[in-house]
Image: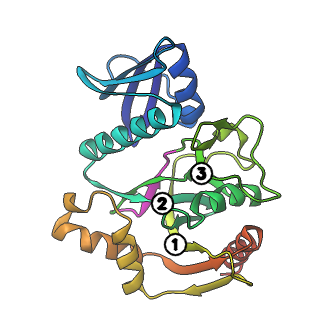
Amino acid sequence: MLQLIVANIAINVSADKHTLNLLTKNYSGLVHASTGLGQINYVTSYQSETGHFYLTRADNKLNKYDNQADFIYFFEKDLTVELQKLRPDLFFLHSAALRLNDKTILIIGHSGAGKSTTTWALTHHGFEYFTDELSPVDLNTMQVTAYSHAICMKHDPPAPFQLPDETLITNRTKHIPVECLPAGIASGTGKITHIFFVHYKPDQRNVVIQPISPALASAKVYANALNQLCHEDSGLPAAAKIAMACDSYSLEFNNVEQACQEIQNLLETG
């Protein structure tokens, strides 16, 4: 049995040895010793004869998958939706979140923009890790709650941020367990102070970091939200509230090490 806690929601997974190993590597940062029935309950298994992974939530058989990457992806996708149903009060963002001293930042970017690579690199610069994927935000306090699963990448990160030996490698993805993060996991929650909208550009010569207006930041936050319709006026005021509470920047880079140094310098001098 794997028992997890996310945003005060208990998740129980009854798993065989094979799927338990996969899920533990991905969710070890969320493991919690609880008792009784979880608010979300899964059964997972792997059949070596067919090579299929099976995923069931409560009594609802979800599907079967023929590789590790699909099994992990669809487990997380279903879990994300169920969490949103149980915590509609939170504003769920597709973003990374990290903390340096008393400052908590969000890293937002489209697929391929370098969000997860930047997150992994920042953990080598003293940033504690909340999440690289899902940021549940309390709109009353502007606090982000941890969703500390393994950092997931599609490509190898550049030097000096090579993948550790413990990385789980599937046919499409690479998952870095949280035990490998140099600065560790952030405890509790963190009040968001800065948002960085990142964009990796292979031809970029220098790191370009520029402040952006609350209006533009609001639009970008809204575009990366997952449960806008759970909130007043389709979530527009919620996105604006987050943007107004933070300093927001665009960050274009080619060298992730230099990008991390610019972020760290801004936080330490600002």
Here the colouring is rainbow
Q: Secondary structure at mark 1?
A: strand
What type is the residue that disc 3 sits on? Lys
Boundaries of the magenta span: 140-147
Q: Horizontal placement of 163 versus 146: left or right?
A: right
State whether the magenta stretch is mostly helix, strand or loop. loop
Residue linked to disc 3: 154
38, above or below 84, in the image: above
Badge 3: residue crowd in 10 Å (few <14, some 14–19, many ≥20): some
- Nearest to the eye among marks 3 and 2: give it: 3
Is 97 left, or right, of 60 in this rendering? right
Question: Which label sits in the foreground, 1 or 3?
Answer: 3
Question: Left of 207 or right of it: where is 34?
Answer: left
Q: Amino acid at mark 2?
A: Ser
**Where 182 falls versus 24 (above or below)?**
below
**Residue bearing mark 2:** 95
Above or below, 81 against 204 in this view is: above
The structure residue drawn at horizontal position 39% and vertical position 71%, both measured from the top left corner, is: 221
Per the model, the C-alpha gap separating discs 1 and 2 is: 10 Å
Depth check: give the residue in front, 232 or 138: 232
Q: Is residue 268 visible?
A: yes
Residue 100 in sight in this render: no
Mark 1 or mark 2, earlier in chain: 2
Q: Secondary structure at mark 3?
A: loop
Identity of the residue furthest to the front in this view: 50
Q: Residue at x 37, y 42 (%)?
A: 77
* Residue that carries the numbered disc 1 in the rendered image: 195
1 and 2 marks in contact (CB < 8 Å): yes
Q: Nearer the viewer, residue 17 or 7?
A: 17
**Residue 107: where, in percent of width, then height?**
54, 65
Residue nearest the viewer, comparing 217 with 156? 156
Which residue of the protein is positioned furthest toward the right in this rendering? Answer: 160
